[in-house]
Every structure is written in structure tokens, then in C-alpha cells.
Image: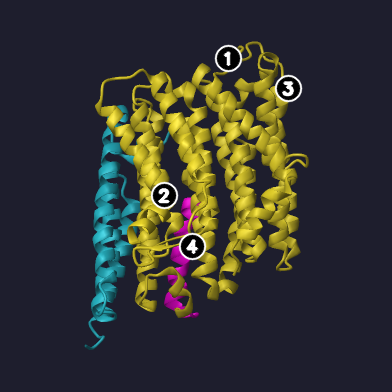
Chain colours: A cyan, B yellow
């Protein structure tokens, strides 16, 4: 199989990763920040699947890694959303600028 | 045969799992008083600690995903011990708390994750262990549900750890793409100075630097430590940091050995920045937890110098230092958690005139701070000495000079607390605190450890005989 489809896929996944990073740094809404992190994790998933299919198709290492990343990202999101709900109860806001009592 | 290996090699993990299940069943049963619960839990944790000292087999499981040897067992025993001490110390805080069992289940699952992290010989197991050790901690950091700072701390912890682990994952995916294997001991032979691999390595190391709070990535540390309950702060600053450092050194020396001339430079830059910034920020802190947070950042800088030596001595001095760090940091946190649970006071101002009513606690805190600063009779001095010697092996003596200068700076802020305790006048000093039996045992063990570990050469010799080198 030719390697040529790998390069465009990697470009997409890298773009997705840095879009996610940009979102994490610029957005101020906690839920949106969480979405940005999910975007970063999903770009890594694309990387793994692409590497597995085009470079090392004889083993399924990359695919299984992807499954684990998806499961752990779900667990992480569950805990993060629980924390955000609890933070909303005390701060009545989900803007990160409001959660800045502790500095330096 | 297979099933025998399963029980023998996974023994420490299975005991922790069993304790988690016992706690779940106790939770399902009828309500018990907090005190009897804490008695049961502390005894269970002590049994768990003892079981770790029985001779263990070496070997691998699950297609060499999980590997254990004597060094890993020793590291797990250190973690078990630290967890038992933290559990003893948080007695006065947990006695009146509504959710004792949930607290222990969260922290035990985090400890289980650390065990898998330490035993991992495969990047998948490594990643799962790392996440398993951080996600429950974020929930535990929010354990004072009604406290504003607690939820802020938990949010900062989960967002920054998720971000750092996604950096780490991108690094892992590039490593997989360029080497075609995920097994740590195989990666080394596939590595060269290929640009994509170097990029992967940089991502990998920044993910790690987040977890151990080395300087450009340290900003979450102080906030999380201040906001979280003290028991969780102690857990974060001792257990999770040392587990990640153990994993860090084994990955650097095993998987990335062929890139050693590159990571030497990275470690030097990180350690210099960490020591200087950690110390300078520690100078201006007023809250005890924040102060200990920055002091622990500075300690990580010293540890990185030791690791950069990349010798046999590098890894043995790291484990030795962490053992001492467990004793001294936990002694300090023990006093803080007692004071905070009984009076709610946490700032350095409140500790003025502490000696007047609480001479014992004052001495414990003082010895702990001396050991953290590295004043000679205590073990902290020997720990730092060995780390700097390991770092000096490469011949860059200016690093050691900067580190030594920073030790002098660190004396200022450690001794500032000691001065507040012994010399400063205070109209309303903290009244006499009665120490329950469990924290008393914990403090006694910590102080004995601080004094004895430095003088008993067997400890260092034993660690040295097990250590790995490049």
C-alpha cells in the first residue's frame, strides 16, 4: 500500500491538535475548554489509527491504544464535569476568570 | 503456573484492590462510627504495608505489559508507607468528616494507578496507570465540597493534567509512528536523532514536567496545593510526585537512553529554572501550604540535577532522596494537618509563638524543615549531597555551584518559619493541641526516619544494590 494518504491525514490531525490547544488557551468557558481538550485527544486518536493502518498493519497496537484513549477521555470528562457543576454551585459561573481567588 | 504467577507478581496490586472492595462492602453495610472505620482502615493499610515486605518474584505478565523487579517493589513499598503515614495523619480531619470511605477509595485507586505506572513496560499500561493515578486525585482535591477554593483547585488540577496528558499522548503517537512498537524496552533500539522522534521526546518530557511541576510547567502546583484539603495536598506533593519521578527515571534510562546527550541539556535547563524560580517564589509566601508547594518545586529541581547525572548513582540517589523527602515532607504536613483540623489556621502568621503552647509539635515541624532545607545532622543533607554528587559526575561544576547558592537562599525561607515558631511574639498563639494517638505514631516514625536514614548506611547500600543505570 502506498504511503501517500498518510501525509494528509497527519496534517489534519496536527491541525486539529493545535486548534484544540488554541481553544484551550483562548476560551474562557470551562465546558468549551473541556471540549478543546477532547479535540486534542481525538487528534491523537487519528494519529494512532493512521499510523496503524498505513505503517504497521500487521498488529493492532494503535487501534487498541485509541480505544483506551476514548474510554479514559470519557472518564476524565465525567470527573471534570462533576467538578465544574460543583464549582458552579459556589461561584454561580462557569467562566474561568471568576475562579481566580488563588494567584502567585 | 500462569495463575500462580498472576497472584505472585500482582500481589501488591491485588491487596490494594481487596482493600478497595472491603471498603465498598463496609459502605454497603450498616453505618459505623467514623472512629471504628478509621481503626479498621489504618489496620488494613498497615497489613498492606507489611505484605509488601515479603520476598517478591521478578518477572512479567500479560505479554510483558506488566513487569516487576526488586527495585519496583521497593518503590511501591515507599509509596505504601507514605500512604499509611498520610492516613494516620489525617485522623483528626477525617474523624468528623461525612465521607471517610469515599475519601479512601479515591486515594487507594490513585495509588493502584501509581503501582501500574511503576510496573509498566508498555506505553499503553503506562498511559492507563498515569491517568488512573491523576483522575481520582482531581475528585479528591474537591473533597471539601462547599469550600470555594477546593473546587477551584480541583478544576485547575483536572484541566492542567488533561492538557499535559494530551501532550504526552501526542508524543507517544509519534513514537509509535516512528518506531512501530509500544514496548518500552524495545523503543530504545529504534531511536535515532530523527527530528520527529526528537519532537516526540520533547512532548513526552513536557508532559512529565507538568506532572512533577518542573518550572515552566509549575503554575498549577501552588494553587492546587493551597485549595485542596491537607491530606490530599500531602498525597499530591509526596506520592504522586515520587511515583511520576520513579517512572520518569526508568523511562529516561531505559527507553530514551540513546538520546541521552540531548536530554542531559533539557534536564539541566529545567532543573536550573526549577530551583531558582521555586526558591524565589517560596520567599514571598504567607500560607504554609503554598510555602511547602514552592519548596517542593525547588526540591524537584535538585532531583532533576541528580537524574541528569545518568549514572547508577543518579537513580539510587533519587530513590534515597525521595525516601527522605517522604519522611520530612510528611512530618511537616502532619503538624500542618493537625493544626488545620483543630484550629483551621494555615498561614505563617498564625504559627508565631507556636512553641509557647506546643513544644513537641514545634520541634517536629522544625526538624522537618531543617531536613527539607538540608541542614547537616538530618537526613535531608545526605540526600541532597548524593543528588549533587550524582549530578557532578558529568563535570559541569557550575550547576552544582548554582544549586549550592540556592540552598543558601532556601535556608532563609525555611528558617523564617522556624523563627516565627520560636522567637516571634504573638498575642493569641495557637492554644495547646491534644495529639491523638495515630498522628503521634506517624510523627514519631517520620522523625525517626529523618534522623536515622542519614546515618544508617545500609539503607543507601540496599537502594544502590538494586538501582538501574544507563
Residue at the (60%, 38%) spot, across then down: B329
Q: Nearer the viewer, mark 4 or mark 1?
A: 1
Q: CA distance from mark 4 to mark 1?
A: 46 Å
Question: Label 1 crowding class (10 Å Cα cut-off): few <14, some 14-19, many 20+?
Answer: few
User: Between disc 4 and disc 3, whose residue precedes?
Assistant: 4
Q: CA distance from mark 4 to mark 2?
A: 31 Å
What's drawn in magenta, residue-wise? B191-213
Helix, strand or loop at label 2? It is helix
Residue B197 magenta: yes
Horizontal side, residue B307 vs residue B374: left or right? left
Residue at the (29%, 64%) spot, across then down: A65
Helix, strand or loop at label 3? It is helix
Q: Which residue is mark 4?
A: B205
Q: Which residue is mark 2?
A: B11
User: Between disc 4 and disc 1, whose residue precedes?
Assistant: 4
Q: CA distance from mark 3 to mark 2?
A: 47 Å
Foreground residue, B17 or B188? B17
Q: Is residue B298 visible to the viewer in this orientation of the structure?
A: no
Helix, strand or loop at label 4? It is helix
User: Between disc 3 and disc 2, whose residue precedes?
Assistant: 2
Task: From the top left corner, tell me how far across and down residue B441 is, in percent.
Answer: 58, 27
User: Between disc 4 and disc 2, whose residue precedes?
Assistant: 2
Residue A57 magenta: no
Q: Chain of mark 2?
A: B
Q: Which disc, if any, is residue B434?
A: 1
User: Between disc 3 and disc 1, whose residue precedes?
Assistant: 3
Quarter holding the C terminus of chain B? bottom right
In the depicted structure, whether residue B464 falls above or below residue B322: below
Amino acid at each position: 500500500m502506498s504511503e501517500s494518504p498518510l501525509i494528509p491525514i497527519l496534517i489534519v490531525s496536527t491541525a486539529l491538535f493545535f486548534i484544540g490547544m488554541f481553544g484551550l488557551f483562548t476560551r474562557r468557558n470551562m465546558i468549551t475548554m473541556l471540549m478543546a481538550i477532547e479535540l486534542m485527544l481525538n487528534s491523537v486518536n487519528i494519529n494512532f489509527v493512521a499510523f496503524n493502518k498505513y505503517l504497521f498493519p500487521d498488529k493492532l497496537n494503535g487501534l487498541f491504544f485509541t480505544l483506551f484513549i476514548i474510554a479514559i477521555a470519557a472518564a476524565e470528562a465525567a470527573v471534570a464535569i462533576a467538578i465544574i457543576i460543583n464549582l458552579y454551585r459556589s461561584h454561580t459561573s462557569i467562566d474561568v476568570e471568576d475562579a481566580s481567588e488563588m494567584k502567585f | 503456573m500462569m495463575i500462580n504467577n498472576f497472584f505472585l507478581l500482582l500481589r501488591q496490586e491485588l491487596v490494594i484492590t481487596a482493600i478497595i472492595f472491603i471498603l465498598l462492602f463496609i459502605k454497603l453495610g450498616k453505618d459505623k462510627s467514623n472512629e471504628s472505620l478509621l481503626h479498621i482502615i489504618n489496620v488494613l493499610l498497615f497489613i498492606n504495608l507489611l505484605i509488601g515486605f515479603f520476598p517478591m518474584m521478578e518477572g512479567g505478565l500479560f505479554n510483558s505489559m506488566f513487569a516487576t523487579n526488586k527495585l519496583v517493589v521497593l518503590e511501591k513499598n515507599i509509596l505504601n508507607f507514605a500512604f499509611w503515614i498520610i492516613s494516620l495523619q489525617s485522623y483528626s480531619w477525617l474523624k468528623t468528616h461525612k465521607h471517610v470511605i469515599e475519601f479512601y477509595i479515591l486515594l487507594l485507586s490513585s495509588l493502584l494507578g501509581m503501582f501500574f505506572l511503576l510496573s509498566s513496560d508498555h506505553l499503553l499500561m503506562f498511559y492507563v496507570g498515569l491517568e488512573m493515578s491523576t483522575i481520582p486525585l482531581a475528585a479528591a482535591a474537591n473533597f471539601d465540597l462547599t469550600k470555594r477554593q477546593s473546587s477551584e483547585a480541583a478544576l485547575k488540577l483536572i484541566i492542567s493534567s488533561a492538557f499535559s496528558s494530551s501532550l504526552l499522548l501526542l508524543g507517544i503517537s509519534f513514537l509509535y509512528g516512528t518506531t512501530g512498537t509500544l514496548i518500552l524496552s524495545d523503543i530504545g533500539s529504534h531511536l535515532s536523532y530523527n527530528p520527529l522522534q526528537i519532537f516526540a521526546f520533547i512532548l513526552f518530557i513536557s508532559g512529565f514536567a507538568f506532572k512533577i511541576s518542573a518550572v515552566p510547567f509549575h503554575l498549577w502546583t501552588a494553587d492546587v496545593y493551597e485549595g485542596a484539603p491537607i491530606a490530599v495536598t500531602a498525597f499530591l506533593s509526596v506520592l504522586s510526585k515520587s511515583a511520576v519521578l520513579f517512572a520518569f527515571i526508568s523511562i529516561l534510562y531505559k527507553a530514551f537512553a540513546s538520546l541521552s546527550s540531548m536530554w542531559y541539556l533539557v534536564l539541566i535547563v529545567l532543573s536550573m529554572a526549577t530551583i531558582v524560580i521555586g526558591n524565589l517564589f517560596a520567599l514571598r509566601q504567607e500560607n504554609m501550604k503554598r510555602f511547602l508547594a514552592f519548596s517542593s518545586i525547588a526540591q524537584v529541581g535538585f532531583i532533576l540535577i541528580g537524574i541528569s547525572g545518568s549514572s547508577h548513582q543518579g537513580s539510587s540517589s533519587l530513590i534515597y532522596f525521595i525516601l527522605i523527602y517522604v519522611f520530612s515532607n510528611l512530618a511537616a504536613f502532619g503538624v500542618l494537618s493537625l493544626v488545620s483540623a483543630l484550629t483551621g489556621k494555615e498561614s505563617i502568621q498564625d504559627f508565631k509563638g507556636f512553641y509557647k503552647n506546643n513544644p513537641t509539635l514545634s520541634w517536629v515541624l522544625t526538624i522537618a524543615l531543617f531536613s527539607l532545607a538540608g541542614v547537616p545532622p538530618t537526613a535531608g543533607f545526605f540526600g541532597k549531597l548524593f543528588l549533587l554528587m550524582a549530578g557532578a559526575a558529568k563535570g559541569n561544576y557550575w550547576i552544582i555551584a548554582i544549586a549550592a547558592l540556592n540552598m543558601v537562599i532556601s535556608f532563609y525561607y525555611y528558617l523564617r518559619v522556624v523563627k516565627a515558631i520560636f522567637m516571634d511574639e504573638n498575642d493569641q498563639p495557637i492554644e495547646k493541641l491534644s495529639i491523638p494517638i495515630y498522628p503521634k505514631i506517624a510523627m514519631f516514625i517520620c522523625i525517626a526516619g529523618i534522623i536515622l536514614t542519614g546515618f544508617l548506611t545500609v539503607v543507601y547500600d540496599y537502594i544502590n544494590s538494586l538501582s538501574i543505570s544507563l
